[in-house]
Amino acid sequence: MSETTQKRATVYFDPLLHRALRIKAAETETSVSELVNEAVRSALAEDASDIETFEIREREPDYAFEDVVKDLKRRGEI
């Protein structure tokens, strides 16, 4: 990404977390910014996946807990 399209933000890290980020950045020959961008991108992708799953499961029928327990008992499974 070119520097002209990047946005600057101030983020405050726990000192130990910041130290770990700096060490990882040095070991992987990348920047702390790149590591943070990658982590945020990954978290947002996981959120998008969760939202998609919720939307799919929203169409599933609902079952009352009591009915499920009664059905399990009727089947002899509990």
Image (cartoon, rainbow, N blue to C red):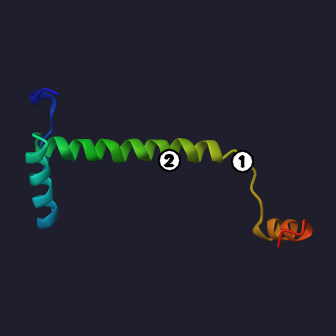
Residue highlighted by disc 1 = 60
Q: In which quarter of the image is the C terminus?
A: bottom right
Determine the secondary structure under disc 2. helix
Residue highlighted by disc 2 = 50
User: Compared to 38, does 13 lie above or below?
Assistant: below
Give the amino acid type for the residue marked by disc 1 in the picture.
Glu
Residue 48 in the image, given as x and y percentages of width and height: 45, 42
Circle 1 residues within 10 Å: few <14, some 14–19, many ≥20:
few
For residue 12, say whether it is visible: no
Instruction: Report the Cα–Cα distance between label 1 and label 2.
Output: 16 Å
Q: How many marks?
A: 2
Q: Which residue lies furthest to the front in this view?
A: 27
Determine the secondary structure under disc 1. loop
User: Compared to 23, does 53 lie above or below?
Assistant: above
Give the amino acid type for the residue marked by disc 2 in the picture.
Asp
Q: Which of marks 1 and 2 is nearer the N terminus?
A: 2
45 relative position to 76: left or right:
left
Which residue is depicted at the point 27% across and 47% down? 39
Which residue is depicted at the point 10% across and 42% down? 31
